[in-house]
Image (spheres, rainbow, N blue to C red):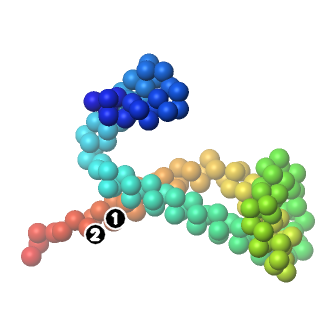
Amino acid sequence: GINAEYGHYFKRINLSSRYVASICNLVMGLKETLCERGITVTSLTTCVAIHELLGLSLLLGSWTAFYHLLRHPVLARPLSRLTDHPSYSRKKQWIERKVPLLQRLPNSERLAMSFGMSVVGRKIAAPLLVPLKITCAVFLTQAVSKLETPTNDR
């Protein structure tokens, strides 16, 4: 079974055999459930890839939106309240550390601020965004699989 096949991976991370058996049973149950519903490895991989691409699009889109919104004085003031959120300063510092090129750009402070604000905005909207991303990923995966499936109409 899966325990004999993949058990050595779990041993590397010091999991007891009881946990390994539980994880293997969970994975096998999930595999059976997915197979019963006609979900293949390919469609699951496609769905996860689409979900991640949607997430990346949301990240870049919200960062861009906040960057441009900060240029308007009328909007900049209410948006500045997002800087009070605990995630803001951590993410602003993170982007400044991880992307040193950002420091050389002319609007580096506004880029860093808009990134921090986009993180906060996405966190606030997460209860809406997460189910929306999952739903869109499933629908897009179904559309892709229909395109890949040959029709016998000819």
Q: Nearer the viewer, residue 14 or 39?
A: 14
Q: Is residue 70 left or right of residue 18?
A: right
Q: Residues within 10 Å of mark 1 (few under 14, many from 20)?
A: few
Q: Which mark identifies residue 147?
A: 2
**In the rendered image, which quarter is residue 63 located in?**
bottom right
Residue at the far bottom: name it: 106
Q: Residue at x 57, y 60 (%)?
A: 55
Q: Residues within 10 Å of mark 2 (few under 14, many from 20)?
A: few
Specify the label residue 72 is tagged with. none
Question: Residues at badges 2 and 1 in contact (C-beta under 8 Å)?
Answer: yes
Left or right: where does residue 133 sit relative to residue 81?
left
> Residue drawn at (44%, 18%), measured in percent from left and top?
18
- Amino acid type indicated by mark 1: Ala
Name the amino acid type tagged 2: Leu
Quadrant housing the N terminus:
top left
Q: Is the C terminus in the top left, top right, bottom left or bottom right quadrant?
A: bottom left
Residue 32: percent from left, percent from top: 28, 36
Give the residue pinned by disc 1.
143
Image side of residue 152 versus residue 58, left or right: left
* Residue drawn at x 40%, y 62% as measured from the top left: 140
Tell me residue 87's x, y (percent).
Answer: 79, 49
Q: Residue drawn 64% across and 50% down?
A: 126
